[in-house]
Image (cartoon, grey):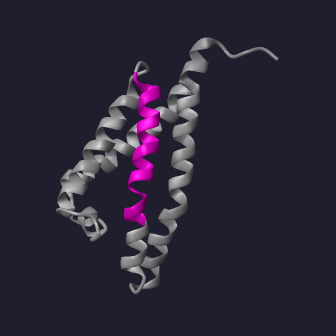
């Protein structure tokens, strides 16, 4: 079996980074365009304003996306993505707590976010290893 040409190898290693970057760009932008839903799931136990955490996580997501887009900074971007995904996990836990008595579709949506973090972390690890 022959190895694919270098151009195809580069495309194969870039695609996961681009997907992560696109997702982070989209969600990071939403933190600024429609911050209220994000404010609502910031754990009340955190000091300060929920809006601060909404904007801070939006900046982290947008910055991480930028790092993932450039081959020179992709490895650092992958590590940053792992940190971001782990950093926002408490908000996902809080969302389940806050939505537990809501109608079952909302409760189900909140619970479904739990396992989704793990494939995103795995994808970021893959990007790190292939960069």
Along the line of sight, which residue is nearer the eye, 12 or 70?
70
Q: Position of residue 106 (x, y in %)?
A: 41, 77
Magenta region, main secondary structure:
helix
Along the line of sight, which residue is nearer the eye, 89 or 29?
89
Q: Position of residue 109 (x, y in %)?
A: 46, 71
Which quadrant of the structure image shows residue 43?
bottom left
Which residue appears at 51% of the width and 39% of the height?
124
Q: Was residue 44 drawn as part of the magenta stretch in this picture?
A: no
Left or right position of 25 against 77: left
Q: Position of residue 105 (x, y in %)?
A: 45, 79
Which residue appears at 40% of the width and 62% of the height?
90
Left or right position of 47 against 69: left
Where is 57 relative to 77, above or below? Answer: below
Question: Which quadrant is the N terminus positioned in?
Answer: top right
Q: Which residues are the magenta region?
A: 73-92
Along the line of sight, which residue is nearer the eye, 86 or 124?
86
Which residue appears at 29% of the width and 40% of the height?
62
Which residue appears at 46% of the width and 34% of the height?
78
Where is 36 relative to 61, above or below? Answer: below
Left or right position of 66 against 81: left
How many marks do you count on the picture?
A: 0
Q: Position of residue 5 (x, y in %)?
A: 65, 12
């Amino acid at each position: 079996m022959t190895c694919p040409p270098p151009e195809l190898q580069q495309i194969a290693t870039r695609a996961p980074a681009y997907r992560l970057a696109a997702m982070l760009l989209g969600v990071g932008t939403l933190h600024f365009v429609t911050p209220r839903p994000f404010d609502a799931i910031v754990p009340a136990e955190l000091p300060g304003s929920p809006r601060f955490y909404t904007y801070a996580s939006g900046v982290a997501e947008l910055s991480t996306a930028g790092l993932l887009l450039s081959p020179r900074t992709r490895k650092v971007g992958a590590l940053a993505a792992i940190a971001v995904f782990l950093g926002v996990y408490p908000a996902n836990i809080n969302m389940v707590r806050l939505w537990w008595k809501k109608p079952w579709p909302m409760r189900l949506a909140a619970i479904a976010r739990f396992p989704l973090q793990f494939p995103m972390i795995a994808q970021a690890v893959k990007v790190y290893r292939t960069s």
